[in-house]
Amino acid sequence: MPSVIKNIAVFCGSSMGNERVYAEQAYLLGKTLALSGIGLIYGGAQVGLMGTVANGALEHGGRVVGVLPYFLQTKEVAHNRLTELVLVDTMHERKTVMHERCDGIIALPGGFGTMEEFFEVLTWGQLGLHRKPMGLLNSNGFYDPLITLVQGMVDNGFLKELNQRMLLHHHDIHELLKQLQGYEPPAVTKWITKTAT
């Protein structure tokens, strides 16, 4: 059954990146979610692509929930115009709250933090802990090397094609949202084969 998406969690960089297109696409994603009536759940900061995607939604009447650890609030990075700001104790709690409050996940370009957040939630899906769609907005081909790496995981026997298909991706926001809305999770989840010793 296709996914019903009321809220999307967005993982992305706290920097803008070197190309203007990253900020443009982040803003456009926020705007598109707002105009589509889809709430945005994100990391709560006003800096980098995080602040840009939030502004795109807020400036077009969207609902935006930020989830921010207390220690980052003290560094004055918290966005001050959100619909709701949820303060948590740890980075792991932040990720858990974002996951609990969303119906799907999109990753914009980012660094280590973005990758860690996205891949842990992707792994949860692989293990059957949730059935939510997860996608990469491949702005400017940013995720091309990662998509190639994932294909290499399949080719070398470390990842099943069934699970590879869980990783949705597209460079166009509307096409990616269609993929998320039409997503059907794999019927079989990952299991560990017990081998003889």
Image (cartoon, rainbow, N blue to C red):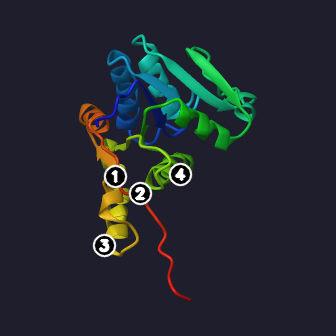
- Disc ID at residue 120: 4
Q: Secondary structure at mark 1?
A: loop
Q: CA distance from mark 2 to mark 1?
A: 7 Å
- Disc ID at residue 189: 2
List the residue tagged with mark 3. 155
Identify which amino acid the numbered label 2 is placed on.
Answer: Thr
- Going 60% across and 39% down the picture, which residue do you hit? 96
Q: In terms of depth relative to the viewer, which is nearer, 143 or 67? A: 67
For this view, does 6 lie left or right of residue 72?
left
- 10 Å crowding of disc 2: few (<14), some (14-19), many (20+): few
| 145 relative to 64, above or below | below
Q: CA distance from mark 1 to mark 4?
A: 17 Å
Question: Quadrant location of residue 44?
Answer: top right
Q: CA distance from mark 3 to mark 1?
A: 19 Å
List the residue tagged with mark 1. 186
Q: Are marks 3 and 1 in contact (CB under 8 Å)?
A: no
